[in-house]
Image (cartoon, rainbow, N blue to C red):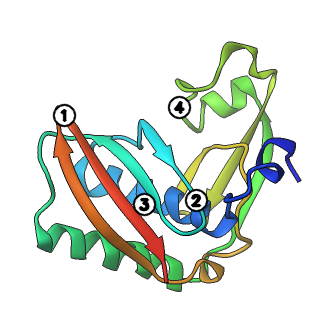
């Protein structure tokens, strides 16, 4: 287990895996990029996106439905180590620190999402549970999405 994550009392691999699926869903539905800020805990979590408005109720339901569709698909969640050069051909390394080393851990959720990540994850999406958006709000170019697993 990664020392950073094993010392975090509220860290939950299922919730972290749900964050990956939410991020990819937001990218696909709103072309807004992955969350620029996130706080992931076992009971509830939040992700912040750069988007120019709050979400309509129909959009919130569409996001929940898509995330839960991916979860129910029981996709494998896998990781592999790639050289920095190989990883750059697969994912954006923009958030990767320069001193992160020559190997990059890439996490994939079936063929739905792939990104660099050092966190712990579920083994398959079905282990995650049911995804529910608790609330959203918008301020100063930031859309905040709060969610939980039920």
Query: What crowding class fits label 3: few (fewer than 14 Cα within 10 Å), some (14-19), or many (20 or more)?
Result: many
Dots 2, 3 in contact, CB < 8 A: no
Dots 4, 3 in contact, CB < 8 A: no
Secondary structure beneath dot 4 equals loop
Corner quadrant of residue 82: top right
64 left or right, relative to 36: left
Instruction: Name the disc covering residue 22, or none.
Output: 3
- Could you tell me residue 118's position as x and y percent? 73, 43
State the quadrant of the N terminus.
bottom right
Corner quadrant of residue 147: bottom left
Secondary structure beneath dot 2 equals loop
Q: Which residue is mark 4?
A: 92
Mark 2–mark 3 Cα distance, whole angstroms, equals 15 Å
Mark 2 vs mark 4, foreground winner is 2
Query: What crowding class fits label 2: few (fewer than 14 Cα within 10 Å), some (14-19), or many (20 or more)?
Result: some
- Can the viewer see residue 112 in this picture? no
User: 96 above or below 53?
Assistant: above
- Could you tell me residue 127's position as x and y percent? 65, 81
Disc with the residue nearer the chain's start (2 vs 3): 3
Disc with the residue nearer the chain's start (4 vs 1): 4
78 left or right, relative to 39: right
Instruction: Name the disc covering residue 141, or none.
Output: 1
- Could you tell me residue 44's position as x and y percent? 48, 65
Query: What crowding class fits label 1: few (fewer than 14 Cα within 10 Å), some (14-19), or many (20 or more)?
Result: few
Q: Residue at x 73, y 57 (%)?
A: 9
- Can the viewer see residue 100 in this picture? yes
Query: What crowding class fits label 4: few (fewer than 14 Cα within 10 Å), some (14-19), or many (20 or more)?
Result: few
Dots 2, 4 in contact, CB < 8 A: no
**Count of marks placed on residues:** 4
């Amino acid at each position: 287990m990664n020392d950073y994550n094993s010392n975090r009392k509220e860290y939950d691999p299922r919730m972290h895996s749900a964050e990956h699926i939410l991020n990819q869903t937001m990218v696909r539905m709103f072309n807004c990029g992955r969350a620029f800020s996130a706080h992931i805990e076992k009971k509830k979590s939040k992700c912040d996106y750069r988007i120019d408005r709050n979400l309509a109720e129909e959009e919130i339901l569409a996001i929940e439905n898509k995330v839960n569709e991916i979860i129910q698909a029981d996709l494998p969640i896998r990781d592999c180590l790639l050289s920095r050069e190989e990883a750059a051909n697969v994912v954006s390394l923009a958030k990767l620190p320069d001193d992160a080393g020559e190997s990059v851990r890439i996490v994939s959720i079936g063929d739905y999402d792939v990104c660099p990540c050092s966190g712990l994850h579920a083994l398959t999406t079905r282990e995650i549970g049911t995804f529910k958006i608790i609330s959203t709000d918008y301020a100063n170019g930031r859309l905040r999405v709060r969610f939980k697993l039920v």
